[in-house]
Each structure stands twice: as C-alpha cells, then as structure tokens.
Amino acid sequence: LNKRAVIYYTECMVRYSNVSFFSLLEVTPNIVLYSNLPAPNPNRFNQTLSDKFNQLIPNVSSSSLIPYFVPDYERVTQAEGSYELESMVQCSPDLDRFNCTVCLVAASLTVSTCCGLPSFALVFSPKCVLGYKTSVLPSPPLSPSSSPPLSLPPISAPPPFLSPPLLFTPPPNPSGS
C-alpha cells in the first residue's frame, strides 16, 4: 500500500511517501493560490505573462546563485497603462532539465486556464513552483513635475513579494555513504 502526502506552505513544502519520489516528475497534486483582483491590461496580459514564463523557464535549470530558482522583475509599459510584473520559477534540483521544463510548462498552463487572469497567482506542484504578482503603477502626470523619478529595485535582487526560495534537498543516502 503506497502512502504519500504533500503539504504546501508559501515558504516550504513537506512531503512524505513510503515510495521514493527522488528524480521522478510529478505535476500533481497541485495547488493554485490566486487573487480575485483582475490583472492589469487584460487584453494583453495573457501574452505578456506567457512571454515572461517562456523566457524564465529555459533558464531555471542553469541558474547559479540559488539552484533551480529564477526570480524576475519587470516594469511593463503599454498603451493601456503601466504595471510591475514580479515573477519566479523554481524546480526541485533532483529533476533533470527536461523534466524541470515539463513541470513548469504544466504549471504555467494551469495558471493560464484555472482562474481567469488574476493579478497574483502561485502554483505549487510536488516538483516545481511558479508564480507572479502585478502592481499597477500610477499614470504619469499630464504636466512636468518637480518630483524625483521613481527608483526601481536592482534587477538582480529577488522580487520583494517572493518568499525565500523553497530549498529542495535530496533525501539522505540510506546506506550512509
């Protein structure tokens, strides 16, 4: 009899199984947390988000500072208005590049089909996490002002809405070596 459980928190995941899950691709069960607020610029947001994840997903398994974790921050300016898009992708490092990509593509498809176009969504699956958050920026004033320009956080800094990445670690070697 196989027994397994997965508990998701925003900063970690707890898994139990009496069968090894190391290096196996698992995209279910997944959990989606999302906002009831709509995303900005709904006519173009889905394409913007799709383009962003298509950019991030291939880079996650080759990320260097924090293995298998890629955060991103972008200011999006469109005719309908401007907004900040904070996004992240992460895989369990026991997955190879191909299965990491499969897991994250499945998570991005879940986001695009599950809940309309929310301003925030986070998808947890047993082997990967994908999420984004938007913040609408105020419209620029019609006349020049003397106020200083908005300062943006450095691109290399993780987006502020993101918790520290989940730290996936391989199970201890039962043989002790």
Image (cartoon, rainbow, N blue to C red):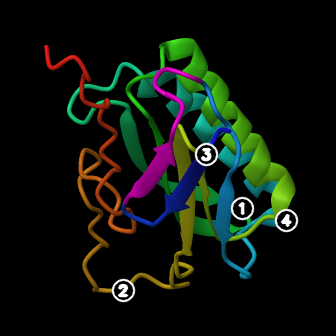
Residue depth check, mark 3 versus mark 2: number of the one nearer the observer: 3
Q: State the CA–CA distance, disc 3 to disc 4.
A: 34 Å
Asked if the magenta segment contains residue 129, the reply would be: no
Element marked by disc 4: loop
Where is residue 52? Give x, y as percent.
59, 40
Residue assigned mark 3: 3
* Secondary element type, mark 2: loop
- Mark nearer the viewer, 2 or 4: 4
Q: Quadrant of residue 177?
A: top left
Q: Earlier in the sequence, mark 1 or mark 4?
A: 1
| Residue 55 image offset from top left, x and y in percent | 55, 30
Q: Residue at x 29, y 35 (%)?
A: 169
Question: Residue 13 in magenta?
Answer: yes
Residue at 72% x, 36% y is 106
The residues bearing labels 3 and 2 have C-alpha atoms spaced at a distance of: 63 Å
Picture residue at 72% right of the left edge, 61% below the top: 79
- Looking at the image, which is closer to me, 62 or 18? 18
> What range is drawn magenta here?
12-24
